[in-house]
Image (cartoon, rainbow, N blue to C red):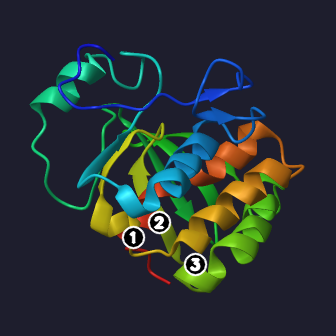
């Protein structure tokens, strides 16, 4: 983090004694942290926010994330920061499909646990803000792994209550972290770009 030319905030989990910004329980992977940051800073957000993991590099961004951030032009509404070929396509008809280039890697069918729970999650948390699902609609097409740049104006297109609802759901759901966090990983682009065919 010391390599960054921008100010930063570090959120921790289960470390209330040592961190001002802390998530009391480790739920929802990075999604709970991202929502908590927005809730904590909604009225004082900078013009742009980078939401990133703790590691400087990994399989889904092999170069230095610090260098990428420092060299990036701050423009647009939403940019995925990963450089992997893994692409996530979420459709209401066919479930969740992850591609590596043109090769299908994972598919969650419509009657699969993950998709059933995701449909319940969407209807409970997203429908009132982003519209109802329609059969065969494309919900999102984006790269994997939940690291992105988003503008303050884009974040504020949705009310603070939206972010509080998502955070509360993550803190209280019985859906395990593998899926609860990925429901958001699979839809960040939709939440901020809202380009779905609904």
* Disc 1 target residue: 156
Q: In this view, does 43 lie to the left or right of 166?
A: left
Q: Is residue 185 visible?
A: no
* Disc 3 target residue: 136
Q: Residue at x 56, y 81 (%)?
A: 129
- Reply above or below: 21 against 195: above
Q: In this view, does 80 lie to the left or right of 18?
A: left
Q: Find residue 17 and name its label.
A: none
Residue 135 percent location from the top left of the image: 62, 83
Q: Is residue 18 left or right of residue 69?
A: right
Mark 3 or mark 1, which is nearer to you?
A: 1
Residue 99 percent location from the top left of the image: 47, 42
Mark closest to the chain's N terminus, 1 or 2: 1
- Residue that extends furthest to the right in the rendered view of this protein: 174
Q: Which secondary structure lies at badge 2?
A: helix
**Are circles 1 and 2 on residues that touch, CB within 8 Å?**
no
């Amino acid at each position: 983090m010391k390599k960054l030319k921008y100010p930063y905030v570090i959120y921790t989990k289960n470390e209330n004694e040592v961190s001002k910004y802390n998530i009391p329980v480790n739920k929802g992977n990075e999604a709970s942290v991202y929502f908590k940051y927005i809730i904590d800073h909604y009225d004082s957000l900078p013009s742009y926010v980078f939401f990133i993991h703790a590691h400087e590099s990994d399989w889904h961004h092999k170069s230095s994330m610090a260098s990428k951030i420092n060299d990036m032009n701050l423009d647009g509404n939403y940019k995925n920061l990963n450089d992997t070929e893994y692409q996530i396509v979420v459709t209401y008809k066919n479930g969740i499909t992850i591609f590596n280039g043109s090769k299908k890697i994972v598919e969650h069918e419509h009657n699969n646990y993950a998709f059933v729970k995701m449909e319940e999650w969407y209807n409970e948390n997203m429908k009132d803000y982003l519209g109802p699902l329609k059969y065969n609609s494309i919900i999102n097409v984006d790269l994997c792994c939940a690291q992105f740049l988003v503008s303050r104006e884009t974040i504020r297109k949705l009310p603070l209550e939206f972010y509080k609802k998502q955070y509360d759901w993550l803190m209280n759901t019985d859906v395990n972290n593998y899926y609860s966090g990925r429901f958001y990983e699979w839809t960040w682009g939709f939440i901020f770009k809202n380009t779905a065919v609904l």
